[in-house]
Image (cartoon, rainbow, N blue to C red):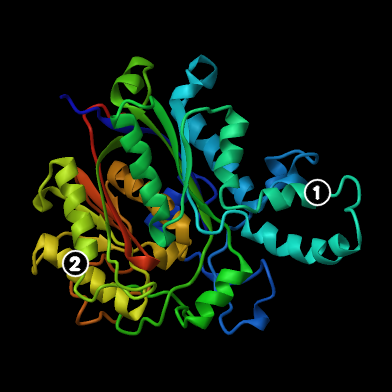
């Protein structure tokens, strides 16, 4: 049976180094560092005061004064990037069968900032009696559920195909893209709106601090002096279509979603498998799904959290698949964007596609003292011009949830 090819026709992005896809591209090329002292809440109460927050994101420029108080920051971010992705795809939904368009969203936090502030606002008034008429907190309580952001997108665009939220820790956004692509391949959908969102929130920042997973200064993936990650916030959405659907409507194509692989370590809630076996399985499955060999991959977009164990284990996993002396360039853009948890796989997939399309390798910044156990080409500090036909993107999460994906240049690509 002929395999349905899935292509990307639109992308939208919000990150610490750019509030749209164009700004993200330029930030990646420039090696821009998006990490600064926290502004969204008081960091002086925490041992770690840095984060990669959005810069200059003004929700009031996107939503009217009636709607804005009733939607969480997560929904705001998701709506903005979804709108950008649909504009980029030039997709007129009025002419589409909306029952064959769905939403798959990866997130760990959903509307958690609304839940935190809503609890503080509602706890005592609720105990005293009914909320004040017109108080937006009733809406925000509903929008704080982890499922709500995807539901909000489906409702806003009247999309009645499959709507799902994936919450597999740091691999959620990449899993969302893979699940959406599979729905198109199975013939269940013509178009899928897929991606991830996670706003910065105080509770996970405190929690990662308790786990001693955060860095006190910079995030330094694959460096000998790395001390942990830095949390960020981001949102990214991609419009996936069957190749037939995209060509029939004359859509511009970024690239093909060629392969997807998933595995689980089933070992520990936070500690990955020291051998790298689980991530290696996900990578090999993605290559097999794409019908490619390791030698056909020109760039690996690493998960690269800058935690002491994870970078070594990812290096081991790459060597298991690509060989001990692999010359394939590898980089971690978390050094610029921070770690946006469930959104990271989605925003970093957009970055991987931009690198493929723009013929450049994003750098791993702050890599001045290489770790002897991390001895691959990590594109240190400065971006590099390079043409390649396929990129492998990794996302590995707590609980041993691993995802890998292959994006491939197509003859129809027209960006």
Question: Which residue in the structure is indicated by mark 1?
Answer: 136
User: Closest to the observer: 400 or 52?
Assistant: 400
**Which residue is depicted at the point 44% across and 24% down?**
100
**Which residue is depicted at the point 26% across and 65% down?**
379
Decide if residue 60 is on the left or right side of residue 333.
right
Residue 322 in the image, given as x and y percentages of width and height: 12, 60
- Between the residue at mark 2 and the residue at mark 1, the CA separation in whole angstroms equals 48 Å
Image quadrant holding the C terminus, namely top left
User: Closest to the observer: 124 or 150?
Assistant: 124
Q: Earlier in the sequence, mark 2 or mark 1?
A: 1
* Res. 374 mark: none
For disc 2, the neighbor class at 10 Å (few under 14, some 14 to 19, many from 20) is many
Decide if residue 148 is on the left or right side of residue 27.
right
Question: Which residue in the structure is indicated by mark 2?
Answer: 277
Q: What is the secondary structure assignment of the residue under circle 1?
A: loop
Residue 236 in the image, given as x and y percentages of width and height: 48, 47
User: Closest to the observer: 92 or 342?
Assistant: 342
- 114 shown above or below 155: below
Tell me if residue 91 can be seen: no
Decide if residue 327 is on the left or right side of residue 36.
left
- 45 shown above or below 76: below
**Which residue is depicted at the point 28% across and 51% down?**
360
For disc 1, the neighbor class at 10 Å (few under 14, some 14 to 19, many from 20) is some
- 336 shown above or below 220: above
């Amino acid at each position: 049976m002929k395999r349905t090819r899935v292509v990307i026709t639109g992308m939208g992005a919000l990150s610490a180094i750019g509030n749209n896809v164009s700004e993200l591209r330029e930030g990646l090329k420039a090696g821009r560092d998006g990490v600064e002292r926290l502004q969204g809440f008081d960091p002086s109460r925490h041992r770690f005061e840095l984060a990669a927050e959005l810069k200059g994101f003004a929700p009031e420029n996107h939503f009217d004064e009636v709607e804005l108080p009733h939607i969480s920051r997560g929904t705001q971010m998701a709506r903005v990037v979804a709108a950008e992705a649909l504009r980029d795809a030039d997709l007129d939904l009025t002419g589409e069968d909306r029952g064959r368009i769905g939403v798959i969203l990866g997130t760990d936090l959903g509307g958690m900032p609304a839940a935190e502030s809503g609890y503080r606002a509602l706890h005592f008034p609720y105990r005293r009696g009914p909320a004040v008429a017109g108080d937006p907190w009733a809406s925000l309580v509903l929008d704080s559920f982890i499922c709500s952001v995807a539901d909000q997108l489906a409702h806003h665009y009247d999309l009645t195909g499959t709507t799902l939220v994936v919450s597999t820790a740091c691999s959620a956004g990449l899993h969302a893209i893979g699940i959406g692509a599979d729905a198109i391949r199975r013939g269940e959908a013509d178009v899928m709106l897929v991606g991830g969102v996670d706003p910065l929130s105080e509770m996970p920042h405190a929690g990662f601090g308790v786990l001693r997973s955060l860095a006190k200064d910079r995030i330094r993936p694959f460096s000998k002096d790395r001390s942990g990650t830095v949390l960020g916030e981001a949102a990214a959405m991609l419009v996936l279509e069957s190749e037939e659907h995209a060509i029939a409507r004359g859509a511009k194509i970024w690239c093909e979603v060629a392969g997807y692989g998933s595995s689980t370590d089933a070992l520990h809630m936070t500690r990955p498998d020291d051998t790298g076996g689980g991530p290696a399985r996900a990578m090999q499955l993605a290559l097999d799904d794409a019908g490619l060999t390791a030698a056909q991959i020109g760039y690996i977009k690493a998960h690269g959290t800058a935690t002491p164990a994870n970078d070594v284990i990812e290096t081991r996993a790459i060597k298991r698949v690509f060989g001990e002396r692999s010359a394939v360039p590898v980089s971690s853009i978390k050094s610029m964007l921070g770690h946006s948890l469930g959104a990271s796989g989605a925003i970093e997939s957009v970055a991987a596609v931009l690198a493929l399309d723009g013929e450049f390798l994003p750098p791993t910044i702050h890599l001045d003292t290489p770790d002897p156990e991390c001895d691959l080409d990590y594109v240190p500090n400065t971006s590099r011009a390079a043409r390649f036909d396929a990129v492998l993107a990794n996302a590995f999460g707590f609980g041993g949830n691993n995802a890998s994906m292959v994006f491939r240049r197509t003859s129809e690509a027209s960006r």
